[in-house]
Image (spheres, rainbow, N blue to C red):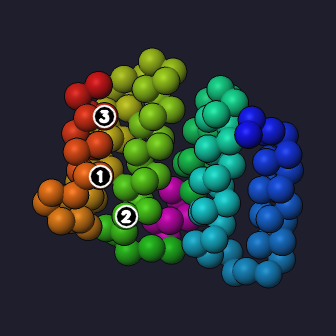
Amino acid sequence: MGEYSKALSSLERSLEIQKIALPPNHPDFASSYHNIGNVYDNMGEYSKALSSFERSLEIRKIALPPNHSDLATSYNNIGIVYYKIGEYSKALSSYEQSLEIKKIALPPNHPDLAASYNNIGM
């Protein structure tokens, strides 16, 4: 809807409640930071998006198995931000990390693998 300030306000309120109700590094924190990153990305605030996506990834590395598809999603979204700001070698590295996880986590003809190969090609 493009109402980014309202979205951020709700997501930050959610994060405040999670900090009270959940143990540190609970996977829900990663989802919240990831969603905040998506809003900043949509706003074109790429440094804030990157910071949020990286925080999400840090939590996911602790809370999830090493080949969980959410890790691949985090690496992919970090790659997207790097691509948008013209840091193509960093984007490529992130896309490749995402692909390696997807190769293990998904069946060989899964459409998400195609998306990863497309991102790498870009």
Circles 2, 1 touching at the beta carbon (< 8 Å) = yes
Residue bearing the label numbered 1: 112
Where does the image place residue 119, in percent across and percent down from the top left? 31, 34
Q: Which secondary structure type mostly characterizes the magenta part of the structure?
A: helix
Question: At numbered mark 2, what does the secondary structure look like: helix, strand or loop?
Answer: helix
Viewer-side residue, 25 vs 37 = 37
Identity of the residue furthest to the top in this view: 86
Question: Tag 2: Cα neighbours inside 10 Å, few (<14), some, or many (≥20)?
Answer: some
Per the rendered image, the range of residues in magenta is: 57-62
Residue bearing the label numbered 2: 69
Where does the image place residue 73, in percent across and percent down from the top left? 43, 53
Of the numbered discs 3 and 2, the one sitting upstream in the chain is 2
Of the numbered discs 2 and 1, the one sitting upstream in the chain is 2
Question: Tag 3: Cα neighbours inside 10 Å, few (<14), some, or many (≥20)?
Answer: some
State the separation of the CA atoms marked 2 and 1: 10 Å
Residue bearing the label numbered 3: 119
Above or below 65: residue 92: above
Viewer-side residue, 103 vs 109 = 109
Residue located 22% across and 39% down the image: 117
